[in-house]
Image (tube, rainbow, N blue to C red):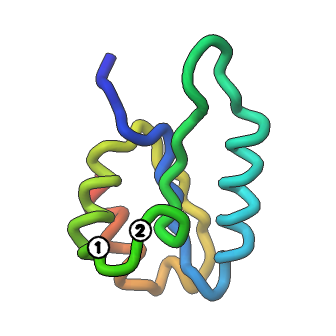
Amino acid sequence: MADYAYSIFISYHHRSSGKAALALERALRRYAKPLFRPPMRVFRDEGQIAAGQPLKETIKSALEKSEYLVYIATREAADSPYVSEELDIWC
């Protein structure tokens, strides 16, 4: 079994799904608590990327170090080049 930095990477369009992504992250942290192991690490860019960090490199690295990808599918996400790039990296 591979050692992942993140259990889940949340991919979404900020304007259309930002609140949903935050709610999903909070719900996963609250309800998906594994027994006898450290809590689940969830990557949501707005919660994980600090000012001054290189955006593209940080996202690519997080995708490569994530066990699962959760894609919040909206029309805006499907049209977003940023979300498409995340999906390309994941696939």
Q: Residue at x 26, y 61 (%)?
A: 60
Name the residue furthest front: 51
* Residue 30 percent location from the top left of the image: 77, 40
Q: Amino acid at mark 1?
A: Gln
Disc 1 vs disc 2: Cβ atoms closer than 8 Å?
yes
Marks 1/2: CA–CA distance: 7 Å
Query: Considering only vertical position in the picture, is 37 above or below 51?
Result: above
Q: Quadrant of residue 72?
A: bottom right
* Residue 80 percent location from the top left of the image: 44, 84
Label 1, on which residue?
53
Q: Amino acid at mark 2?
A: Ile
Q: In the image, 19: left or right of 67? A: right
Q: In the image, 29: left or right of 81? A: right
Label 2, on which residue?
49
Q: In the image, 19: left or right of 12? A: right
Q: Residues within 10 Å of mark 2 (few under 14, many from 20)?
A: some
